[in-house]
Image (cartoon, rainbow, N blue to C red):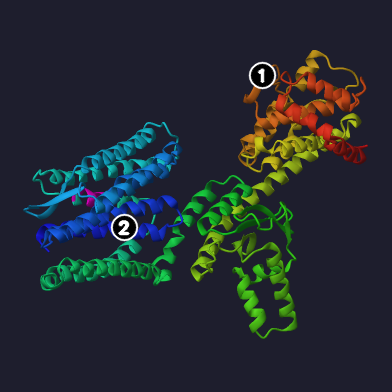
Amino acid sequence: MNLYSIPPLISSLLILMLGFFIYFKTKRRFESSIFSLMCLVSGGWLFCYSFAYSSTSKEIAILWFKIGYCCVVFIPVSTFHFFVKFFNINKFKKLVFFSYLISILFILAIWFSPYFIKDVYKYSWGYYPLGGSFHPYFLIFFITLILLSFQVFYSVLFHKIKLSHLLEIHSKYLFIALIVYNLAGVDFFPNYGIKIYPFGYIPAFIFTLIIAYTIIKFHLMDIEIFIKKTSIITIGAIIPVALLYIMLSYIQPILYPKVGPLWLLIPVSLSFLIGFGLFRFVRFILQMNEADLSKKFAYRPMLEKEAERTARARDVREMATFIVRDVSSFTRLDHTAVFIQNEQKNAYSLMASVYRKKDRPRLEPGLLLSIHSPLVAYLKDEKKPAVYGQIMHDLQNKDLTTHERKFLESVESEMAILGAEICVPSFCEDEMVGIMNLGNKITNEIFTGQDLQAFQTLANQTGRAISGLLLKTEKIRLIVSSQKSLLETLEARDHYTRGHTERVSQYSMLLGNKLERLIHSIPNSVSALNWTAQLHDLGKVGISDNILLKPSALNDEEFAKIKEHPTRGIEILGPLKEWFGEDIIQGVVHHHENFDGTGYPDKQKGDAIHIFARIIRVADAFDAMTTDRPYRKGLSIEEAMNEIKKFRKIQFDPVIADAFVELFESGSLKKTMDELKKKYG
């Protein structure tokens, strides 16, 4: 092998190894498979050309160049396909398909037509192919696809296509890699007699470095694993390559005089055998010692991501949603669910779940696991994950007492009902605050010790955050209860407003559940709305009984005093703002704002009014209209509904007003009113 052929050989091995790694590491992602193809055809091109440079005859050189050109043909189409798939640009998908068909036609021309590779020329670095009359058409095809690849990046970099922030960062690295890689086109010059050394391996090598750097920078694979496996596989690849080189350099002069051109069957067959053997060897290396080389690092990105998410989760439901989505996606489970300790601490409530198989039985939303259930007792006692397979093994193989066997059978039965392969407890100090239920892997792989360790680490990591959010929720509940007692004392003095706060709260809850899509982004959503409704009239505590209990209509001065109650309520709640949060505060202070901007205290208008305040505005007005006062008779439900319809877009948000009318028409509102009437008379 001459000196000129060594650099492209080394570059080819690096690119081939990158392609193998990307494929076997992330082969479930289609774009990764395309990128692997791009690496394999690029590496194959340089590999074949490096041996062609050292060939001892034109026949051998032409054979290597034909094989190499079969790889070159797929370089532009695989590159274009990768970028189209990576950025999901649908308008180019048909063009990708036709490009592959054209590539196949060029391969046929390479092998069966003398017009693609006309001959070879002996340059100072060795043999090089001379392009035939078909070759310029291939160059047009090559350049067209490369220009289309740049068109993709134009759409991306100039925001013609909207991407996530992370994809935008990746696109910049890929764009630089594409520019560098296209400098390898200098290798086409010698095809037309231009005596310039084909240094395309240099930009190809730099391209490999940029991609590898991107992989390391964005944690697409661990650098330690990358270095170890690259070293092992490269050594394994050099040995068969060396054997092939010896065959071509030393055996060819002996066999060629005896059998003529037929001797080419020997190195070609050997090449296929080496390729197949190398493929099997790579797979073996990728699988060997997987637990030692990669499992201890594999969960690091997920754990780091969850640490960041739990730190900014606003309530336990949001945190549970993050956990089930990320764990299910990362480990490819058919089912993931999270149970969180309820307010009464007598059960664990299903907060979030994800299913990845249509035929997977679903758990009922709000499902409760009692603290007395066998599974909960097992997790609290053992303080480690409950593994269904391990429990079954213990039942079948361990010497157990009657009590122990009955207990484990109950645990096994409960896990089977939940469809859980693993149940992981989440502790904060000695209190179990949550349970993570995990189904089976879609890939049918077994759970390893590293899996269990990672899940337990995640559970411990989130335990303190869950406990903090539960504590905050409990404090808010206690504060609301204490403030509510003041309102109940106030209402007890006025027979006509007795139960007003509770009724407004119940009506608001009905609306909140119906309009959950509008409030789901608010921490504790429906619960927070309930707390807001219970506190909405807190400011009336400081208003004189002469005004509140006046048996006749209020004059302007008295009504002005009444209109101060929203701001008086904030004066009371102000010191507790850190606990309540801005949503509850805004709901209390603005629950008398009108949709058209004529309300009080700040004359807010439309969507500028907090959603809680708009909901309570409807519920509060409805209760006021249907409640008897000393100076007037309350309206019927139908009459009150007509008023709400009449003043939609004026006093009331039309979306909320329409939802309230739907609650009335469905019978839900009447049912709630009947229940409240039994309670308050």
Query: Is residue 326 depicted above or below 503 in this figure?
Result: below
Q: Does the magenta stretch include residue 503?
A: no
Q: Name the residue under label 1.
A: 603
Q: Name the residue under label 2.
A: 18
Along the line of sight, the residue nearer the viewer: 136 or 242: 136
Rendered location of residue 620, percent (x, y): 79, 29
Q: Which amino acid does label 1 sit on?
A: Lys
Q: In which quarter of the image is residue 420?
A: bottom right
Query: Is residue 243 depicted above or below 513 in this figure?
Result: below
Rendered location of residue 492, percent (x, y): 88, 35
Q: In which quarter of the image is residue 248?
A: bottom left
Q: Quadrant of residue 333?
A: bottom right
- Report the residue at 72% width, 46% height from top: 478
Around disc 1, counting alpha carbons within 10 Å, would you say few (fewer than 14), some (14 to 19), or many (20 or more)? some
Along the line of sight, the residue nearer the viewer: 576 or 655: 655
- Report the residue at 17% width, 68% height from top: 245
Sooner in the amino-acid sequence: mark 1 or mark 2: 2
Q: Using residue 494 as the reference point, say whether residue 192 is left or right of it.
A: left
Along the line of sight, the residue nearer the viewer: 422 or 183: 183
